[in-house]
Amino acid sequence: MPEGKNEFISVVIPTFREESNIAKVLRGVKKQLNNYNYEIIVVDDVRGKDRTASIAKEMGARVLYDNVGKGAALIKGLRNAKGDVIIAMDADLSHEPKELRLLIDAIEIGYDICTGSRFIIGGGSEDIPMLRVLGNKLFVFLVNVLFGANYTDMCYGYRSFRKGVPQKLGLSEKGFGIETEINIKAIKKHMRIVEVPSTEKRRAAGEGKLKTFSDGWVILSTIVKNAV
């Protein structure tokens, strides 16, 4: 084990038709974690029917399979992760691997969850249209008011967890409501949470999976469901 890097790191990456991006993502992750012991878990949606899983295996990732949605895939990956620090990230190159160390550091200094934010000083996005900005602000406002939180970003999936935290959250969202569910349940369970600046890059290749209106409704439903 490298000197001074005693934590075992798990990186969980849900995928759906990301064969054009996954190799670059994995290379970036490996470069940033070269001084750590780590595992990379790719949870691939079998409905994609492309080479994402085979490429990930060739590059040394542990591959699991799902056929439900992003939330279900992420939950499966988190449950199977063995790390002292567990990181969730997307497979489309929108999340910068160079930010991994900041997410790790936050857990090392005592936080239970560290989440990237595009809307604090130092963060930003190259790939979020105004309609989604407004929707995100609405969801942030609702969660902060209803649950006494202080979030600045609600629908961003780049984050880290202390070992055991994902299980304590009792997650169940199967789709794009998963990030919101994590944020709400972390507050309800009085976990130590910090946001750090993150810069969202443009998707490198392929089409985004988020559907503004239908998935926006899912996120709103997640907020309402957890408020009652």
Image (spheres, helix red, strand yellow):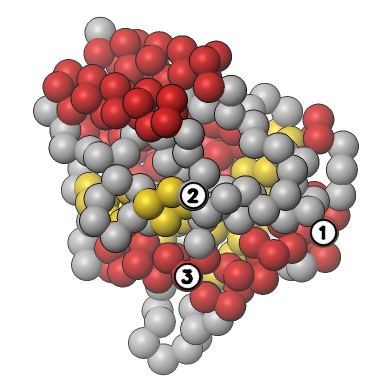
Give the residue type at disc 1: Ile
Name the side, left or right, on which 72 lies relative to 187: right
Nearer the observer, 58 or 210: 210
Q: Is residue 113 visible?
A: no
**Helix, strand or loop under label 2:** loop
The residue that disc 1 covers is 55
Determine which of the numbered discs, if any, sits on residue 37 in the image. none
Q: Tell me if mark 2 has few (under 14), some (14-19) or many (20+) residues whose alpha carbon lies within 10 angstroms of its own.
A: few
- Which residue sits at x=58%, y=29%? 210
- Which residue sits at x=33%, y=17%? 223
**Helix, strand or loop under label 1:** helix
Q: Tell me if mark 3 has few (under 14), some (14-19) or many (20+) residues whose alpha carbon lies within 10 angstroms of its own.
A: few
Give the residue type at disc 2: Glu
**Helix, strand or loop under label 3:** helix
Quadrant housing residue 30: bottom right
Q: Is residue 62 visible?
A: yes
The residue that disc 3 covers is 98
Nearer the observer, 157 or 41: 157
Q: Is residue 206 above or below residue 62?
A: above
Give the residue type at disc 3: Lys
Farthest residue to the top: give it. 228
Q: CA distance from mark 2 to mark 1?
A: 27 Å
Q: CA distance from mark 1 to mark 3?
A: 22 Å
- Which residue sits at x=81%, y=30%? 47
- Which residue sits at x=42%, y=41%? 156
Determine which of the numbered discs, if any, sits on residue 126 in the image. 2
Residue 108 position in % (x across, y down): 28, 68
